[in-house]
Image: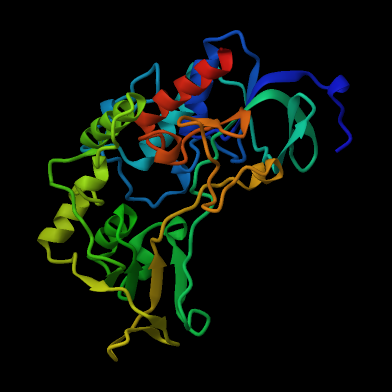
Amino acid sequence: MTDTTSSRPVLDVAVIGGGQAGLAAGYYLRRTDLTFEIFDAQKQPGGAWPHAWDSLRLFSPARYSSLPGWPMPPSPQPGNPPAAHVVNYLTAYEKRYELPITRPVRIKAVHRHGGLLRLDSATRSWWARHVISATGTWWRPYLPYYPGQRDYKGRQLHTVQYRAPDEFRGQHVVIVGGGNSAAQILADLAPHATTTWTTQRPPRFLPDDVDGRALFELATRRYLAQQNGHSDPDGIAGLGDIVMVPSVRQARDNGALQVRPMFTRLTATGIAWDDGHAQDCDAIIWCTGFRPALSHLTPLGLRDNTGRIPTNGGTQAAAEPRLHLLGYGDWTGPGSATLIGAARTARDAVRTITQ
């Protein structure tokens, strides 16, 4: 990079990522005297939401799925809001608070530069006194390896590549994973294709009346316990893993939520278990989760052997106090990866920066 700090203004705060966590940070930064810019790699607003499958809906009603300052308007469709409604809300949110967002700009690396942090894209650099990283996990899908994976002739895709059931109509599809994505995609596919659901351990379904509101309350209790030095309660994990949204409840009532133990290998035509049983299939959908998208922070040398960056118990990186992390999961604040939970961690990060 050829830019120098003498030729470019220095930002007080640079936010990397323009999804829900980045926008929540922007809301609180807008209420300060700090100069800031949000850099978003996507061509359109909405973070990861425009890339989700068509039938995805929130776990909660709109009023319990809001960013700070402005409640999400009710969805014109009955039930909890679909992903498209969330995209519209985030798009309007940017405009409502006149957030300074530059897109599409992919920050490839963050370096220490004297008393500043330098952000490098493919074409230029920016300098900032503080960086808030809010790139999430959607952009780093996790695919486990199983023997025979390269021999399989059918289609393999991850959650991020699934859109709608029509392309699988009449096929046999294997869904891998014991979380919400697997259950919802299975429910989406079941009326149109035959399915086999495989998991490492039996899936744990939440009670029918537990939705995103209850999950956020549990996360809040966990947060308060941590802040007060009390032992960490079981929280959400103590209840289960899968939220029984209407589509999953219907699939259960129709007998579609049948699960098999995890297969041990792939064959040219499908999957197989050590007991000799095999299942041919046309496609395998790996609903196997994500990892934090932190490659842009590699030059700082902060990640531990888990792939995470240790924090001081909140959002601030333990070994680099000029860096804050938002929305990567409970390790950056309970509920921080949810719409309603993004506010609390964003507020705390901006408060620390202003202090």
Identify whether 31 is placed above or below 307.
above
Is residue 81 rendered to the left or right of residue 248? right
Identify whether 304 is placed above or below 252.
above
Residue drawn at x 34%, y 30% as measured from the top left: 226
Residue 256 picture quarter: bottom left
The one of 94 and 29 positioned closer to us in this rendering: 29
Identify whether 190 is placed above or below 172.
above
Is residue 51 rendered to the left or right of residue 6? left
Residue 232 picture quarter: top left
Q: Position of residue 225 (x, y in %)?
A: 29, 29
Q: Position of residue 111 (x, y in %)?
A: 74, 37
Residue drawn at x 39%, y 39% as measured from the top left: 330
Residue drawn at x 29%, y 64% as measured from the top left: 189
The quadrant of the picture occupied by the C terminus is top right
Identify whether 178 is placed above or below 347.
below
The quadrant of the picture occupied by the N terminus is top right
Q: Position of residue 270 (x, y in %)?
A: 38, 83
Residue furthest to the left:
253
Q: Position of residue 26 (x, y in %)?
A: 53, 21
> Would residue 94 be visible to someone looking at this image?
no
Residue furthest to the bottom:
276
Residue furthest to the top:
33
The number of callouts visible is 0
The one of 202 and 20 positioned closer to us in this rendering: 202
> Would residue 11 be visible to someone looking at this image?
yes
